[in-house]
Image (tube, rainbow, N blue to C red):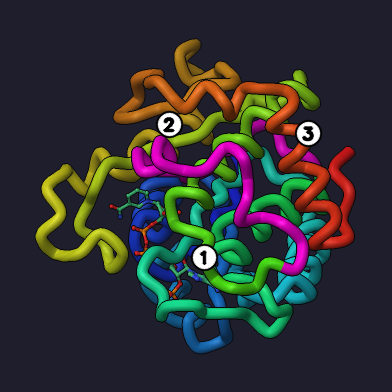
Amino acid sequence: MARIFITGSADGLGQLAAKALVGLGHGVVLHARNAERGEQALQAVPGAEDVLIADLSGMDETKALAAKANALGVFDAVIHNAGVYQVPRNSVTQDGLPLLLAVNSLAPYILTCLMHKPKRLIYMSSGMHLQGDPQLNDLRVGNSNGRVSYSDTKLHDVILCMAVVRKRPDIFANAVNPGWVPTKMGGAGAPDDLEEGYQTQVWLAVSDDPEARVSGEYFHHKKPSRYLPAAGDIAVQGHFLRLCEQITGVKFD
Ligand SMILES: NC(=O)c1ccc[n+]([C@@H]2O[C@H](COP(=O)([O-])OP(=O)(O)OC[C@H]3O[C@@H](n4cnc5c(N)ncnc54)[C@H](OP(=O)(O)O)[C@@H]3O)[C@@H](O)[C@H]2O)c1
């Protein structure tokens, strides 16, 4: 039995992956933005071990989440799943950062740095990362004008994943494009298969299949796919990690 921590598991693909993993007999710790959502998450995923609470838009709450997760021991796998897509224009967090950047990019960065190292890491990206800006112009310190795009943040997730791959060769780290699927984020009209939208994460988290025990891939429906080559560029990764450290005060090592 493996133990898996899934961010953003009160809804959508995180909740579906959690249900599937519990169904396979694994230990799952959920995460939700507040106590009410936490209760709802536990009701939706009977058999989950616990739920941890943190609003990932706040850097201090995200750092505290890492400490809460560490208090539960070392996880076998962590799925960095929580994300936002359509946010009110120029949404800025209590830290003065674009909301998209805080939740989609900085939260996985902070948790990756501060949590005990699991054996497997999964970063939820998107096909839209291909339109992200590898120059990282919207990640500069002090840029609180909210111009960062969803595509930028989903590219950040792939860059972070590939930096982990390079710096932590003992871990299986992979990114996932779940397709455009009908969750709260994807909308009711999304054309792709919902089940395929979460099965890849489940497989990467626990499978002994040699094709799942790999690192440095960007999977779509369990198949390695092409990701933006800049994400594998050491200079881009270094730039990304430096900017994240400047913004969060947390060092990746
Ligand atoms: N659905 C798609 O078509 C699609 C396509 C490509 C990539 N993805 C990626 O797949 C992942 C999951 O997406 P989804 O479709 O399952 O989205 P979703 O249904 O909107 O679920 C997102 C989850 O993240 C949580 N979350 C958002 N902001 C948060 C915050 N500030 N603090 C804590 N939790 C927060 C949400 O909590 P609440 O429920 O409380 O809001 C929810 O549990 C995301 O990373 C997304 O970028 C999805």
Residue at the disc numbered 2? 203
Q: Which of marks 2 and 3 is nearer the N terminus?
A: 2
Residue at 55 percent across and 36 percent down: it is 158
Question: Residues under labels 2 and 1: Cα distance?
Answer: 35 Å
Residue in the foreground of this view, choosing between 11 and 228: 228
Left or right: where 126 falls relative to 179: right
Say which amino acid is labelled 1: Arg
Give the structural element (helix, strand or loop) at label 1: loop
Give the structural element (helix, strand or loop) at label 3: helix
Pinpoint residue 68: horizontal percent, then vertical percent.
Answer: 78, 67
Question: Residues under labels 3 and 1: Cα distance?
Answer: 22 Å
Say which amino acid is labelled 3: Gly
Give the structural element (helix, strand or loop) at label 2: helix
Please tell me in which quadrant of the rendered image residue 110 appears: bottom right
How many C-alpha atoms fall within 10 Å of the one at disc 2: few (<14), some, or many (≥20)? some
Report the span colored magenta.
117-142
